[in-house]
Image (spheres, rainbow, N blue to C red):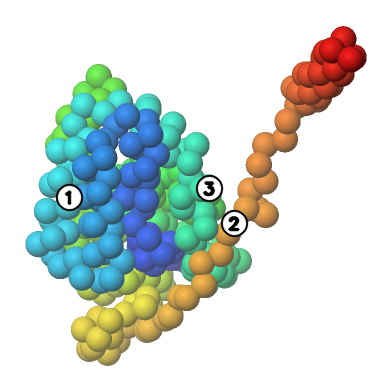
Amino acid sequence: MAGAAAFFDLDKTIIATSSVTAFSRPFFAGGLITRREVLRTAYAQFLFLLGRADTEQTDRLRQFLSSMVKGWDVAQVSQIVNETLHEHIEPTVYAEAMALIDEHHLAGRDVVIVSASGAEVVEPIAAMLGADHVIATRMEVVDGRYTGEIAFYAFGENKATAVRELAEEKGYDLAASYAYSDSITDAPMLDLVGHGFVVNPDRSLRKAAAEHGWGTLTFVKPVALRPSFPPPQRSVPALAIAVALVVGVVLLARRRRRRSA
């Protein structure tokens, strides 16, 4: 028998934020974007979180982000994402989503993150969550830098196509598989599997769920994953050097006080 999988949208389904715009501050600190671009991405995220970003606004944001990343060094982007992942993404993960991921793994199903965000952002998040595979938007890269063009946009029908291709490659039985999303734009993906679920739906999405026969879930509790991912420990030599420096400063201060006395 073919195996099955659970396909999860990322933004506002697994995490309570936008994965791309969540990194606007570290991108600014790294010199990749201007203060004006930080404000623009913050406003876009505000609309997104309120559920007021329609298809036209989402497309404009995609075009803006594509033009903004033109010329960025791919290695620098990956470094920033990996170094700031726990600070900007980890506290926003829904506990209910993590519980579902664990349940699917225990049932022997692969977990696949399917996101319209860029692969350089999605893949480290998926690794943190313990996902097995990733479907994400991929930007065109030449000589290690983004050209500003999109090689594959994981949005709408494209998501369903990529899910179908991955299922054929891995031998997933889609009729026995699951999918989760907060957006009506993922209707093709939800309809593709035997068990589709909408997350935190607004009125229109709830109505669509009833029409399509999708289940409805409510995620309300972001939880920090820090206990599962402890910070790196200082090496003994590094700690010894730090202690020696502190002791040296204290002794030097005492000597100066004695001389002045």
Whether the residues at callouts 3 and 2 have beta carbons within 8 Å, the answer is yes
Direction from residue 13 to residue 39 in the image, left or right: left
- Locate residue 203: give its quadrant: bottom left
User: Quick one: label 1 or label 3, which is nearer the N terminus?
Assistant: 1
**x%, y% of residue 255?**
87, 13
Residue at the spot of label 1: 62
Q: Label 3: few (<14), some or many (≥20) within 10 Å?
A: some
**x%, y% of residue 170?**
40, 53
Across the whole image, how many numbered discs are drawn on residues?
A: 3
Which residue does the image show at 67% across and 54% down from the upper left? 227
User: Quick one: label 3 or label 2, which is nearer the N terminus?
Assistant: 3
Q: Is residue 159 above or below residue 220?
A: above
Which residue does the image show at 42% across and 57% down from the upper left? 112
Which residue does the image show at 23% across and 65% down from the upper left? 47
- The dot on residue 2 is none
Direction from residue 85 to residue 25 in the image, left or right: left
Residue at the spot of label 3: 86
User: Quick one: label 1 or label 2, which is nearer the N terminus?
Assistant: 1
Q: Nearer the viewer, residue 133 or 49?
A: 49
Residue 151 in view, yes or no: no
Whether the residues at callouts 1 and 2 have beta carbons within 8 Å, the answer is no
**x%, y% of residue 87?**
51, 48
Instruction: Work out how far the residue at label 3 is from the one at label 2, CA to CA, in angstroms.
Output: 8 Å
Callout 3 amino acid: His
Residue at the spot of label 2: 225
Q: Is residue 73 above or below residue 33?
A: above
**x%, y% of residue 172?**
40, 61
- SS category of the residue bearing label 3: helix
- SS category of the residue bearing label 2: loop
Location of the C terminus (image quadrant): top right
